[in-house]
Image: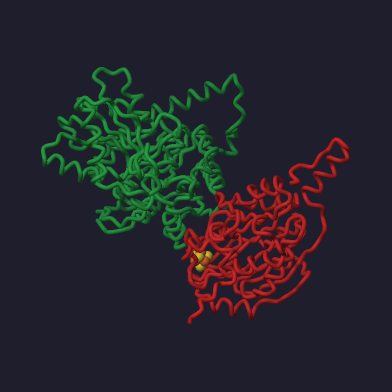
């Protein structure tokens, strides 16, 4: 039986990867992901994990090495953040297009400039189109559980795609939390040995990554699109199997106290936990407000989301990134896409919070609630807004 | 009446950025001190000097020195500086970064800048580890040294940076430790006056991570080690200046040559082809 103990989330996540018996870890140091791969390096050095640890010279090399090892049929793991993820950019597309199973943890951190090592979602949100399955954990327990889940999803013969597991840098990665860690044996009952559908094999030679001329490129892209959309069913099945085995059930979209809620807050990651505390107080005071959060981000669980927010009159969407000069924050964009044209679609109040490590406090939710409430009472929907800015979005900084 | 004497390099620092982030006993500050004195000696006017850094503890130099500076992304100081150097041939361009930045993630750029012999001075503070992210293995960590990613000691072959710069064609290649402040200042002055690419490696302690993890004592003890184990060999064959774990450190000015710089090569070729139609770019009237 697994025991509950206080442990730094990065260490628990690394242990979980170790218990998944990964074969190859290739990584480059970058804050705040570093403790994860450092711990894996110790597990390998101490003989607890029979794996190759490759201390490569850049993240571009890390992701390239991961592609090579996955192509050879090895269970592959890496972790990165921010600039590191950005440097991997071109190789991320290739990992997905070549259907190479692997798991990458991203401890989310802001992108430069200005240089900033703290948390927001600009790193992952600028990688939305790479074709990877992407999940967001809100706390250490979830992050740790999702490691074997991600490996199982990635390696499922129906899926065979790389999976990115996101959690907030520092806020989750460096937190010491009580975590119930599954043992190696328990994980073994859940995660079968990796049996790649295709791999480089000298006895059955074939080529990976050849040129896709205009006459096949579109079909190749379509095949990738089918693959990631079709991964939804296996993902839900794997979540359920995990719950049946270990008692912790995960869903693509989570709802919290949304019964009869007129206003629903939508967000991802660790701020949801602060929001839940805030919602509890609001509900005690009789305010009808709840939370919906995406755990699965790619493939976008549009139907689950629609169901989760059905009946709400206003959605307050909290983004941790935005597209300068473009249509606001990514979560808001995608929610609007999801709801466009549906009957009785709720009105949407979009705000951007917590950029580059700026803390989000319960009072910030009060402020956002006021905007949503005004819209509920008939005020026009305000344009997207950066909150927490000195002097206000349109004021002087 | 009490007098408060100003730090002699105060005018070169952004004092509003102090206290700095460097740990007690770290060698980066010493290297910066030597560098600023070298700039003064080389009589480079303040507004004609660019300092470009990458990411890492040494990368902070670009933030602390009060000249036009650019704190770039990790590993990319040299390409930024190449653009600067080509666009401002009248200015002195210096890349000031660490071993992780220049030899690992940016290693490719170092090779090509030396090959092209771009007009710039590359100052590489080599503390044999990644300081800022917690002491992982870099391509310069000596064999058997412990890093956070090699808990049982490094088993990879490290880079010998002077040899790398030399073999790629840099015009000036030297190495000192932060113990050798006078020699280092002299060498940096020379490097700043060199046409083409000059490469100066500065061996420096990281007491917080590299020294501590390898039980090598504090900053002062490391300076004593540098004092006792450095051997000055000007003109040494760079193939023979590798650094073994706690072994001898060969220091000195190893290479001085006069290969034409990138700009000179470019201008010569363009003149050959275009003759009188060629007008060199960027020389300020
Ligand atoms: S971590 Fe090491 S290199 Fe960085 S400031 Fe401290 S002593 Fe210097």
The reply to whether residue A10 is visible in this rendering is yes
Vertical arrangement, residue A359 with respect to residue B210, above or below: above
Name the image quarter holding residue A268: top left
Q: Colour of chain A?
A: green
Question: In the displayed structure, does residue B154 sit left or right of residue A341?
Answer: right
Chain letter of the red region: B
The answer to whether residue A134 is left or right of residue B91 is left
User: Which of A123 and B60 lies nearest the eye of the viewer?
Assistant: B60
Q: Name the residue: 37% across, 29% down.
A: A333
Seen at 83% across and 40% down, the residue is B270
Residue B217: give x, y in percent of width and height.
51, 77
Number of on-image labels: 0
Q: Residue furthest front?
A: B1
Relative depth, front residue between A121 and A164: A121
> Relative to A23, is B15 above or below?
below
Left or right: B214 in relation to A143: right
Q: Position of residue A175 (x, y in %)?
A: 32, 55
Is residue B151 visible to the viewer in this orientation of the structure?
A: no
């Amino acid at each position: 039986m697994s025991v509950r103990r206080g442990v730094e989330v990065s260490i628990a996540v690394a242990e979980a990867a170790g218990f998944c018996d990964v074969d190859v870890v290739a990584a480059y140091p970058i804050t705040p992901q570093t403790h994860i791969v450092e711990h894996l390096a110790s597990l390998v050095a101490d003989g607890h994990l029979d794996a190759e640890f490759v201390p490569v010279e850049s993240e571009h090399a890390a992701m390239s090495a991961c592609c090579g090892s996955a192509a050879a049929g090895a269970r592959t793991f890496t972790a990165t953040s921010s600039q590191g993820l950005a440097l991997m950019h071109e190789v991320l597309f290739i990992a997905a297009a070549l259907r190479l199973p692997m798991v990458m943890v991203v401890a989310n951190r802001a992108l430069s400039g200005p240089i900033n090592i703290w948390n927001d979602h600009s790193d992952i949100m600028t990688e939305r189109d790479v074709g990877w399955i992407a999940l967001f954990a809100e706390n250490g327990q979830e992050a740790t559980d999702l490691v074997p889940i991600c490996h199982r999803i990635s390696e499922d013969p129906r899926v065979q795609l790389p999976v990115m597991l996101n959690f907030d840098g520092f806020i989750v990665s460096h937190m010491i939390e009580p975590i119930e860690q599954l043992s190696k044996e328990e994980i073994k009952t859940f995660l079968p040995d990796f049996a790649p559908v295709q791999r480089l094999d000298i006895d059955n030679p074939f080529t990976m990554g050849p040129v896709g001329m205009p006459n096949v490129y579109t079909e190749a892209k379509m095949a990738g699109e089918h693959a990631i959309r079709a991964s939804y069913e296996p993902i839900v099945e794997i979540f359920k199997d995990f719950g049946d085995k270990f008692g912790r059930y995960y869903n693509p979209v989570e709802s919290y106290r949304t019964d009869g809620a007129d206003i629903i807050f939508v967000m991802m990651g660790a701020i949801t936990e602060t929001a839940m505390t805030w919602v509890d107080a609001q509900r005690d005071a009789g305010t009808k407000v709840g939370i919906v959060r995406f755990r699965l981000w790619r493939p976008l669980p549009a139907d689950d989301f629609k169901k989760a927010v059905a009946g709400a009159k206003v959605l307050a969407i909290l983004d941790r990134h935005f597209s300068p000069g473009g249509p606001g924050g990514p979560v808001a964009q995608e929610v609007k896409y999801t709801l466009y044209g549906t009957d009785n679609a709720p009105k949407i109040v979009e705000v951007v919070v917590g950029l580059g490590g700026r803390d989000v406090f319960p009072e910030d939710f009060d402020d956002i609630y006021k905007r949503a409430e005004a819209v509920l009472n008939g005020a026009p929907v305000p344009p997207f807004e950066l909150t927490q800015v000195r002097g206000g979005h349109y004021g002087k900084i | 009446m009490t007098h408060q004497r100003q730090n002699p390099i105060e005018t070169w620092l952004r004092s509003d950025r102090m206290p700095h982030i460097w740990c007690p006993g770290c060698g980066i500050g010493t290297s910066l001190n030597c560098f600023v004195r070298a700039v003064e000696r080389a009589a480079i006017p303040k507004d004609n000097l660019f300092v470009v850094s990458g990411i890492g503890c040494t990368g902070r130099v670009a933030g602390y020195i009060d000249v036009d500076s650019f704190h770039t992304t990790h590993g990319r100081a040299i390409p930024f500086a190449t653009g600067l150097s080509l666009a401002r041939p009248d200015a002195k361009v210096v890349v000031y970064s660490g071993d992780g930045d220049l030899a690992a993630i940016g290693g490719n750029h170092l090779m090509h800048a030396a090959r092209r012999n771009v007009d710039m001075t590359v100052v590489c503070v080599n503390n044999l580890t990644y300081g800022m992210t917690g002491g992982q293995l870099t391509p310069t960590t000596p064999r058997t040294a412990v890093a956070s990613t090699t808990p049982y000691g490094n088993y990879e072959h490290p880079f010998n940076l002077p040899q790398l710069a030399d073999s790629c064609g840099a015009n000036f290649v030297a190495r000192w430790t932060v113990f050798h402040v006078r020699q280092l200042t002299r060498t940096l002055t020379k490097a700043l006056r060199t046409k083409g690419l000059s490469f100066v490696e500065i061996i420096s302690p990281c007491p917080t991570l590299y020294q501590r993890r390898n039980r090598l004592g504090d900053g002062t003890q490391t300076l004593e080690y540098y004092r006792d184990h450095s051997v000055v060999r000007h003109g040494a064959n760079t193939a023979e200046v590798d650094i073994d774990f706690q072994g001898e450190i060969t220091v000195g000015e190893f290479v001085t040559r006069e290969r034409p710089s990138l700009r000179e090569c470019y201008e010569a070729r363009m003149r050959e082809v275009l003759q009188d139609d060629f007008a060199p770019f960027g020389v300020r009237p």
